[in-house]
Amino acid sequence: MNDILNPSLPESTPAKVPLKPLGKVLAVTSGKGGVGKTFVSANLAAALAKRGQKVLVLDADLGLANLDVVLNLYPKITLHDVFTGKAKLEEAIVRAPGGFSVLLAGSGMVEYSRLTPNVRDDFLRIISGLLPHYDIVLLDTGAGISDVVLFAVSLASEVLVVATPEPTSLTDAYATIKVLVGEQKRRLIRMVINQTARMGDGRAITTQLQQVLDRFVVAKPGENVRLVHMGDIPADPSVRMAVMKRQLLMQSLPGCPAALAISQLAAKLQDTLITKRS
Ligand SMILES: Nc1ncnc2c1ncn2[C@@H]1O[C@H](COP(=O)(O)OP(=O)(O)O)[C@@H](O)[C@H]1O
Ligand SMILES: [Mg+2]
């Protein structure tokens, strides 16, 4: 078996070792912050769980972790305790209200927002240990192209970029995709456009981004990066209401437009990612 898939990694894996993306891990990332990564990760996990999938969400936004806030969870043991050797991985896994598992970062993780060889080793070890137990692991990553965000994304076999129709979000999404193509040799990136005003807006935005990438970001001559539009999520006041109540939208208002869009996204992801692999 590949070293990276072996939970008992040697004490210090050199930081230079090229990373091989692990199976069944989907990084939810974005160029700009505040676009809805945590909202999408948590509710997508609930929608996939409802479809019978075994899902774990890992709070990989080390600097600004807030999955716990969204899910209204106060775990005694967090990823921080696993990193420092105070707890076992299994002890830090918490059951979320939506029928999925979560691994929360905890406030102590701020000190890990710099990428050191130890942080890399710990992350690899943890994700490798989780993989055999879940149909899919979602990484709720930070925004942008810092080392630690790119590292978290590099652990994933698939990337879902969340963007909103705002011009700033789109230019930041473009910059992120460009780096993922250049540094991680990604050839396929999945897109979800959140907070759209009208149905169909998201697909048009993805098409527009694809055109810019085709012109300016050529992976290899004749081999361009392909964006796959996975869906639109409409701007919906119910989202904010659910966040304010610290409830999952899929549980509190499952029939609202944004929740229905997340259900569709889950169905599409299950068809394209999970079914294909198992
Ligand atoms: N589809 C939507 N409709 C309305 N508001 C939304 C939607 N998606 C996200 N939001 C708002 O944006 C806020 C930030 O989302 P969050 O998931 O925390 O962003 P990120 O994780 O990307 O920083 C949410 O708390 C919510 O109020
Ligand atoms: Mg977030």
Image (cartoon, grey):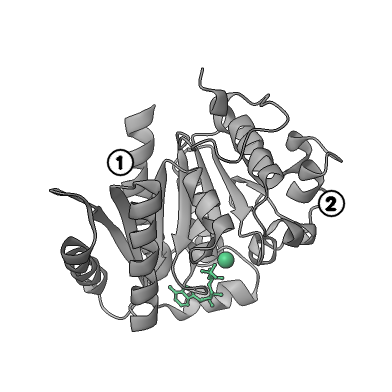
**In this view of the protein, can residue 249 be seen by the observer?**
no
Which residue is found at the position 61% from the left and 37% from the top? 124
Judge from the rendering whether residue 203 lies leftward or rightward of residue 48; answer left or right: left
| Residue at the farthest top position | 1
Which residue is found at the position 51% from the left and 57% from the top? 41
Q: Amino acid at mark 1?
A: Thr
Q: Is residue 219 above or below residue 3?
A: below
Q: Is residue 230 above or below residue 55?
A: below
Is the residue marked by circle 1 packed among few (<14), some (14-19), or many (20+) residues within 10 Å?
Answer: few
> In the image, which disc is placed on residue 272?
1
The residue lying toward the viewer, choosing from 250 and 20, is 20
Quadrant assignment, res 176:
bottom left
Judge from the rendering whether residue 1 lies leftward or rightward of residue 73; answer left or right: left
The residue lying toward the viewer, choosing from 253 and 141, is 141
CB-based contact (under 8 Å), mark 2 and mark 1: no
**Quadrant (top left, top right, bottom left, bottom right) of the C terminus:** top left
**Which residue position holds label 2?**
76
Which residue is found at the position 50% from the left and 60% from the top? 250
> In the image, which disc is placed on residue 210?
none
